[in-house]
């Protein structure tokens, strides 16, 4: 049983990207099932195209999808996991985020990253070089518009000439920001400002012990940035395999690493998730194989078991 001194960890689920071709109405139904069975959040990847063994495949556009999910749900948090700042002019991305936050009535978490999949950059005409430098400028524009509502900025890659964000997010100070990176330079740029940081399951080995090791390193960087580690929540994607899972179809971000997914009965999975909570995770996103409506519904039993023993 988790100690009462440990804050309750939120549990979200990532909706399918390219695992299978999901009709849009079914994508919405999956988000609604996630809300019904008790997930705290639902997430959608911001990608455009992957080259897979089955051919070129991509998900629906992320911000449009999040707007639809926001309208179709009432209580569940939602966000991109994570939004590439390269795919939109940064001021426009801030506008999209403020709009989705308004549609959801304050349920958006703005996950941001620099992107990694060169194939989609080349295919859709976005610059791939100097991604972190471009991200730094984009992040300055996005966070300033969401928090302050205006900016006059002229950089090497982006300009926002006397830009005003109006209407604003319904929340004073804007929606919370999450950085989807554990790279030193990306964290140096963002840790003074973000509300949380996030890493992909392959980056820490998909274990609570691996999560704890990486959290310890990032906590040191948070303190070096002049903040307390408790000011910036630690979050992570967690790979889970259910009955019928045959391997998660996705891009090559995992590389050659052999990563064991979490698996087991609802009680066994709940115990494994408690390990992440004990390691200091404030919020996790389950990346499920297979990811279907039935899988999300079944995971409701895991959520019940997780909360039952607190």
Image (cartoon, rainbow, N blue to C red):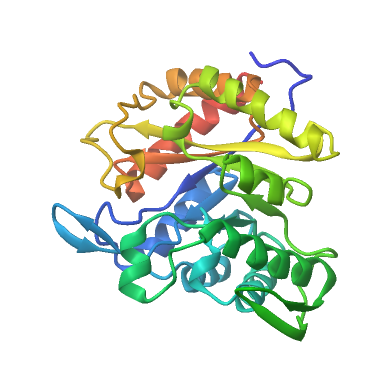
> Left or right: where does residue 269 sit relative to residue 6?
left
Q: Position of residue 306 (x, y in %)?
A: 56, 26
Q: Nearer the viewer, residue 293 or 235?
A: 235
> Left or right: where does residue 60 sit relative to residue 41?
left
Q: Nearer the viewer, residue 222 or 111?
A: 222
Q: Position of residue 67 (x, y in %)?
A: 54, 71
Q: Position of residue 50 (x, y in %)?
A: 28, 59
For the N terminus, give its image quadrant.
Answer: top right
Q: Residue at x 61, y 38 (%)?
A: 235
Residue 130's place in the image compared with 5, above or below, is below
Q: Quadrant of residue 85?
A: bottom right
Residue 35's place in the image compared with 95, above or below, is above
Residue 8's place in the image compared with 231, above or below, is above
Q: Position of residue 118 (x, y in %)?
A: 35, 60
Q: Quadrant of residue 26?
A: bottom left
Q: Quadrant of residue 101?
A: bottom right
Q: Residue at x 57, y 66 (%)?
A: 70
For the C terminus, give its image quadrant.
Answer: top right
Q: Nearer the viewer, residue 141 or 194?
A: 141
Looking at the image, can residue 266 be seen?
yes
């Amino acid at each position: 049983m988790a100690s009462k001194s440990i804050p309750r960890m939120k549990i979200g689920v990532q909706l399918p990207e390219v695992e299978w071709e999901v009709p849009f109405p079914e994508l919405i139904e999956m988000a609604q099932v996630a809300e019904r069975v008790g997930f705290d959040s639902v997430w959608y990847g911001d990608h455009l195209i992957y080259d897979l063994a089955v051919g070129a495949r991509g998900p629906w556009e992320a911000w449009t999808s999040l707007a639809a999910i926001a309208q179709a749900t009432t209580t569940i948090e939602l966000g991109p996991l994570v939004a590439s700042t390269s795919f939109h002019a940064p001021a426009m991305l801030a506008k999209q985020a403020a709009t989705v936050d308004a549609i959801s009535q304050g349920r958006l978490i703005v996950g941001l990253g620099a992107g990694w999949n060169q194939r989609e950059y080349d295919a859709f005409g976005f610059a791939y070089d100097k991604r972190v430098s471009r991200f730094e400028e984009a992040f300055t524009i996005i966070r300033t518009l969401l928090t302050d509502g205006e900016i006059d900025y002229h950089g090497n890659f982006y300009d926002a000439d006397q830009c005003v964000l109006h209407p604003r997010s319904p929340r004073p100070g804007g929606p919370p920001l999450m950085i989807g990176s554990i790279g030193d330079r990306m964290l140096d740029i963002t840790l003074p400002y973000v509300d949380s940081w996030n890493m992909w399951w392959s980056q820490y080995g998909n274990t609570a012990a691996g999560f704890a090791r990486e959290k310890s390193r990032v906590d040191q960087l948070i303190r070096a940035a002049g903040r307390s580690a408790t000011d910036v929540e630690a979050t992570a994607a967690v790979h889970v395999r259910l009955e019928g899972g045959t391997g998660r179809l996705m891009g090559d971000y995992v590389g050659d690493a052999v990563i064991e997914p979490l698996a087991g009965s609802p009680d066994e999975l709940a115990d494994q998730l408690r390990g992440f909570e004990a390691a200091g995770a404030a919020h996790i996103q389950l990346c499920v194989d297979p990811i279907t409506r039935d899988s999300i519904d079944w995971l409701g039993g895991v959520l019940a078991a997780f909360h039952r023993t607190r």
